[in-house]
Amino acid sequence: MKFRSPSGKIIRSPKKLSFDFVPDKLPHREDEQQKLFMLFRRVIEDGVSQNVFLQGNVGTGKTASAKRFCMDYEDWAAERERKVDYVFINCRKRSNKSLVLWKIIHKFDKGFPDRGFSVGEMMEIIRRHIKDSGTHLFVVLDEADSLIQRDGPELIFLLSRFDDETIAPRGSLSLILISQKNVLELLDESALSTFKRGNRLLLEQYDKAQLFDILSYRGELALYPGSIEEEELNLLALIAGERGDARLGIELMEKAALLAEEKGQNQIGPEDIRTAKADIDPYMTASRLRGLNENERLILLSAAQKLRNRSFTTTGDLESHYHVLCETYGREVLGHTQFWKYLKSLSGDGMLETETVASGKGRTTKVSLSDIPAGLLEQKLVELIKG
Ligand SMILES: Nc1ncnc2c1ncn2[C@@H]1O[C@H](COP(=O)(O)OP(=O)(O)O)[C@@H](O)[C@H]1O
Ligand SMILES: [Mg+2]
């Protein structure tokens, strides 16, 4: 067959939306980067190694922050004519002492055999390399809980005390542990003693406003100018903000962009975002819709119709359109207070999103759909309402 490329053009640089791309800047993580620097500054200035633990939920930028930090620290050290190197290991994939140590050695000896050496021998090889090359080595163990759970805390202990057995004048190896859970709780007394209390950094979940900034920045890097507007960025931030998860936001942006390109658009629309959300992580299932009562269905249908071409509508518009629908379907109209009650219960159930914002006339409540394309929701609801 003849293949057909999508005619829309939105994504300029696909790799800048990929998981392992590390952007130059990490908006809203500047304080954390600075804190890491304050902890590790002494590595170069005083020759003292440090062990640091980075904790946070999915998509809070743990991996990106650690990578960005190592790269920037390497540059900072180079300006001071000191060599720093780092090895980044995801422990979900490589989860025992030998594999982790092999990966560290592999960083400077690409031909190193993957069997035949004991843990002690490999530690010695690393030690010698560090000494000979005059490097300070950062070992980053990402998703460290996997390693500890499968293989115990011994390797953490060995690496975090690396310098104790070295007679070198300056620190040689620093450890960064990353995990969603508090891995310090998984360590035994001796391993724990090598982590100072202040050396734990907690990355809080991003809020909606922060995600907006992050997503507009990532959009600028990866997309053609003008391919996403503020309203649509707001919708993305709203959806990702429910979990404070930058990864979800970027994934949705990419998926929505691909869907829009496929349809021949040069811009991401609200329906593309909702379709992307429904594909990645569907919430509004048929059984949830069937569980709604008649009033809720009509209010939701009103929202679906109002939102066909827009990211947001207001409760005022929603209510007047709801009146029209009641007339169309010959149903009794709810009073204003009752209408609000049902609207609140819909938003409480996550069927639609409401947000009150200050506006010129006082306060307005904005309504949006985040999970399902409005067109599809409309279709399903009409079927249900007609029975
Ligand atoms: N502050 C930020 N600015 C820009 N992109 C970010 C920021 N925080 C996270 N990201 C991006 O979001 C995605 C998820 O971040 P990641 O570091 O993998 O999270 P975690 O490791 O905590 O699950 C990555 O693509 C990352 O580049
Ligand atoms: Mg990660």
Image (cartoon, grey):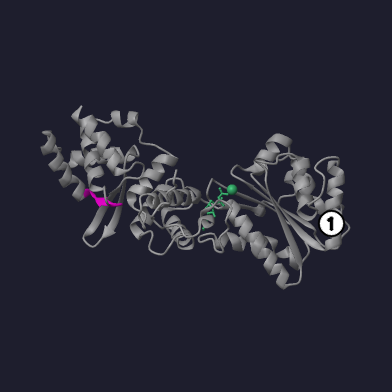
| Residue 114 located within the stretch drawn in magenta | no
Where in the figure is residue 42, as x and y percent of width and height? Answer: 73, 64
Q: Nearer the viewer, residue 50 or 269?
A: 269
Mark 1 sits on what residue?
129
Q: Secondary structure at mark 1?
A: helix
- Residue at 54%, 60% (x, y): give it: 26
Question: Position of 166 compared to 375: left or right?
Answer: right
- Residue at 25%, 54% (x, y): give it: 364
Question: Position of 354 compared to 135: left or right?
Answer: left
Quarter of the image where one finds residue 348: top left
Q: Residue furthest front?
A: 1
**184 vs 215: above or below:** above
Q: Nearer the viewer, residue 306 or 210?
A: 306
- Residue at 63%, 57% (x, y): give it: 67
Where in the figure is residue 119, as x and y percent of width and height? Answer: 83, 42
Where in the figure is residue 22, as x and y percent of width and height? Answer: 58, 58
Question: Position of 336 compared to 29: left or right?
Answer: left
Where in the figure is residue 164, as x and y percent of width and height? Answer: 84, 52
* Bounds of the magenta segment: 310-315
Quarter of the image where one finds residue 7: bottom left
